[in-house]
Image (cartoon, helix red, strand yellow):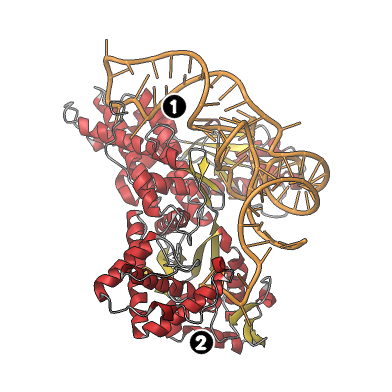
Amino acid sequence: MIGHIQELIENALEHLVQRDEIELETTPDIQVERARNPEHGDYASNIAMVIQKQLKKPPLEIAEKIVKAMNESKHISHVEAVKPGFINFSLTNQCRLQVIKKILDRKEDYGSNDIGKNQHVTVEFVSANPTGPLHVGHGRGAAYGSSLVNVLKKSGYQVHAEYYVNDNGRQMDILATSVWLRYLELCGDQLRFPDNGYQGDYIVDIARKVRAKFGDDLRVEVNQIFDQVSKDESQGGDKESHIDDVVQNTKNLLNDNYAKVFKIALKQILGGIKDDLEDFNVYFDEWFSEKKLHESDWIDRAMQRLKDGDHVFKKDGAWWFNASYFGDDKDRVLMRENGQKTYFASDVAYLMNKMERGFDRAIYIFGADHHGYIGRLKAAAKALGYDPEKVDIQLVQFANLFKGKEKFKMSTRSGSFITLKTLIDEVGTDAARYFYVMRSHDQHLDFDLELAKSQTKDNPVFYIQYAHARICSVFRQLDAQNMPYNEEIGNVNLKLLDTDHEKALIRQLSMYAETIAKAAVSYQVNTIANYLKDLAQAFHQFYAHCKVQGNNEDLRNARLNLCSATRYILADGLALIGSSAPTEMHSEDFDYND
RNA sequence: GCGCUCGUAGCUCAGCCGGAUAGAGCAGCCGCCUCCUAAGCGGCAGGUCGCAGGUUCAACUCCUGCCGAGCGCGCCA
C-alpha cells in the first residue's frame, strides 16, 4: 500500500513538472508512513515539506497542488492537504476490511514477510558456561534470542540457532574437581573444600551420580590431593593458585578416570540446561562444543590465517593478535607464554567456522558485560578477511530481579542465585517470557517476581491471554446458543463493521505484518510485546461495546470473523515471544482459601 | 582515566528513519455486572521529555558540552 501511494505522489510530481508548475532539481525521496492519529487518515506523506526549500513556496500550497494533480485510485477514498503541509490519505472501507479476509485465509501464516530473502543467519545466544544450572540472569538472553529467532524465521530468513558450549576451559576443570571432592566426602573422607570451588548443592547431586557409578573406586589418600598445594584465601593465600594446584593434583591422581568424572559432570549440567530451556520454549539447532574446536584443527587454522595476514606478533613469550590495528582498544593474546591458547583464540576459530559454513550473517547475543567483545570480534572478522558487517552483536542489558521492593543480588560461584527453573516454577513460562522481552533488550529491566506471578490486571501477559480466551469462549458457546458460525456470511457482511471500536480493532490488525517486519529489521522484539498489548486493548474495548452473539445473523458472523482474525493474530504473536495462548482462563475470585 | 549504555507522569516504561495536540500500564480519585469470563469497560487528575547550546521549515528523536546512573576495560573464563 505504501508503494502504491508513493507511486501516486511520484506521478503527481511528474505532472506538475511537465506543466511547469514546479521545478525540481533533484528527485526527492518520497516518504509515506502510517498516520499515527486516525484523524489523519491511514497514511501520510511529508513530501511537500521536504521539497519546500527547493521550491521556496509555503508547504501547504505545494501540498494542495500535489493533491490536485494526483490520479484517482480505487483503494483511496480521500486525499487531503493539511496544516503544516502533510498530505493525508484515507483508504476505502473495502480496502481496510481486506485484512480480515487475508488473516482468515492465511491463518497462522499471516504476517510473514520476505525481507530475509532466504538469507542464512546463525544466531548464537545463552552460551552459558556449563558449570551450573541457568539462572535468571541467563533468562533474558534466552527469551530475547529465542524470540528473535522466531521473528527472523517469520521474516523469511533461514535461521540456525546455536549454543556455544564452553566445555574446555579452566572453569570446567574446577567444576570436575569440585565434583570429585564432594564425591570423596560422600565416601566418608574429611577434607577442606577450596574457597574457589563450586559450592552449589547441585555439585553434591552430581557427586552422588559419580558414586553410584564408580562406588569407592575413585577414592585416594586425601592428603595426596593437598600435597604441595599453595595456601587458600581463607588461609592467607591466593584462592586462584590454590584451586589450580588442587586441579593439577586431581588430574594426576585420577589419570584416565579424570575424563570420566569430567564427562559425567558436563553431561549432567548440560542435560539440566537443555531441560530448563525446553521448559522455557527455547530450542537450539546446534550445541557447538568448544572442545571440538581444539580437537579438530580449527584453532590452528584460524591462527595460521592470522599469521599469514601478518596480524600476529610475539611479545613476552606470548602470541598476540594486533587487534588495535583493526579498531579494537588493544591487542589481544591468542596463546599464552605457557603455551595455552586463550579463550579468545577459540572465539576467533569459532567465528571463522561460522563464516566458512556460509552464513550471510552471524548474530551474537551477549550479556551487557561482554560489550568489550564487539571490538575484538569485529577486528578478528576484518583480519580474517570477512566483512565485519556480517558480524552482528546485540547486547542484552541486565535484568534486576525484584520481589516487591526487595532486590536480589546474585553470584554463580557462591551458589546464591535464583535458577531459571525456580523462576519458571514460580511465575510460569508464559509470564516470564513476556516480562523478559517487554522492554527493549538494550534497556535495563526491572523484573518484579510478585507482579509476574500475580494473576491480576496488573499483569500485562494475562491481559493479552484473556483476550484470546474470551474469543475462544465466544466460539465455544455458539452451539449452545443455537447460533451457527458461517465464515462466508461474515465475509459478505464485513462492511457492517463500522463502529469506532470495530474500526480501531481492524486498524490494529492491519499493523501486525509491518510490526513483525520492523522487529526483524531492528531486532526490537519488544515491539511485538507492545503490539500485542495494544491489540488486546483494542479487542477488549470492542468487546465491551459490541455484542457479538446477537440475533442479526449478518452482523453476528461479520463480528465473529473479526474475532476469529484477532484470535489468530494473538496466538501467533504470543507464540513469537514464546508464550502460549490459553483457550480458557478463570478468575480466582471465588477461592475461599485466600 | 578511557570506552559503551541510559536519563520521558509519583512508579515501571512506549515513542519506528526528525514531523501535526508527548502515549500506555500501575498507584490515586469517580463511575459500570438481572447483559458473550469485572483477569473487563468508561471518566478525572498527573509532563519545562536531566541541564545548556547547535543543526533544521520542524527536535523527546540528530550533534556538542555539562550533570547524574549503570556496565566494561587481565597472558580470567
Q: Chain of mark 2?
A: A
Of the numbered discs 2 and 1, the one sitting upstream in the chain is 2
The secondary structure type at the circle numbered 1 is helix
Residue in front for this viewpoint, A441 or A346: A346
Res. A572 in view = no
Image position, residue A16 (x, y; %): 66, 45
Residue under numbered circle 1: A500
Q: In what quadrant of the picture does the C terminus of chain A appear? A: top left
Disc tally is: 2
The chain letter for the residue carrying disc 1 is: A
The residue at which mark 2 appears reads as A300
Viewer-proximal residue among A81 and B30: B30
Q: CA separation, marks 2 and 1?
A: 66 Å
Please tell me if label 2 and label 1 are on a single chain.
yes
Q: Nearer the viewer, residue A473 or A549?
A: A473
Residue A239 seen from this side? yes
Q: Position of residue A196 (x, y in %)?
A: 50, 67
Determine the secondary structure under disc 2: helix
**Whole-percent x, y for residue A35 in the image:** 55, 38
Asked where in the image residue A71 lies, by quadrant, the reply is top right
Amino acid tagged 2: Asp
Query: What residue is shown at x 45% (from left), y 58% (from top)?
Result: A415
